[in-house]
Amino acid sequence: MKKPIPIYGKGENVRDWCFVEDSCAAIDNVMHNGKAGEIYNAGGNCEVKNIELAKSILKIMGKSERHIKFVKDRPGHDYRYALDNSKIKRELKWRPSVTIEAGLEMIIRWYKDNEWWWKPLKERLSAESRGFWER
């Protein structure tokens, strides 16, 4: 790894993770089976501290935890993001199916296998961003 993984504060902030394919399945389910005008939260029921997520990513990549860099937390940073998905589970019988471990492994594998696709985009975006900030 060329850059460390920045972790705000002590990494105790909690996020609710849902794999992208599960999110897409939830959207499809709502489109076909949901009631017009209703709101359906499609959370993953997978609350994880940021520090634990970073450690999991490093473990999958075969890297040491020394790649973690703790940085000053943002003022007003939310401690927890989580959704109550009981309504979509109850009314539309939707449930997330991919565990965070399996999802992380699939995402990391995809990025490793498809560097030819995303790296030129990242380089172009970086160049455009530099130009924007230099104006």
Image (cartoon, helix red, strand yellow):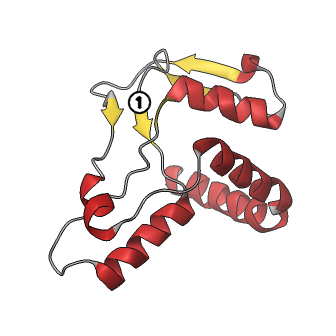
Q: Quadrant of residue 1?
A: top right
In this picture, is 105 found above or below 76?
Answer: below
**Amino acid type assigned to the residue bearing label 1 in the image:** Val
In this picture, is 48 found above or below 64?
Answer: below
Q: Quadrant of residue 19?
A: bottom right
Q: Quadrant of residue 79?
A: top left
- Residue nearest the observer in this picture, 31 or 6: 31
Q: What residue is drawn where x is 59% and y is 47%?
A: 99
Q: What residue is drawn where x is 67% and y is 31%?
A: 56
The spot of residue 2 in percent (x, y) is 80, 34
- Residue nearest the observer in this picture, 109 or 126: 109
- Residue nearest the observer in this picture, 135 or 55: 55
Q: What is the tally of numbered marks visible in this picture?
A: 1
Kindly tell me whether residue 53 is visible in this rendering: yes
Horizontal arrangement in the rendering, residue 57 relative to residue 135 (left or right): right
- For disc 1, the marked residue is 14
The spot of residue 44 in percent (x, y) is 44, 49
The spot of residue 3 in percent (x, y) is 73, 32
Q: Dot 1, how many residues are within 10 Å of its Cα: few (below 14), some (14-19), or many (20+)? A: some
In this picture, is 100 found above or below 78?
Answer: below
User: Outermost residue toward the left?
Assistant: 37
In this picture, is 49 found above or below 84?
Answer: above
Horizontal arrangement in the rendering, residue 103 relative to residue 106 (left or right): left
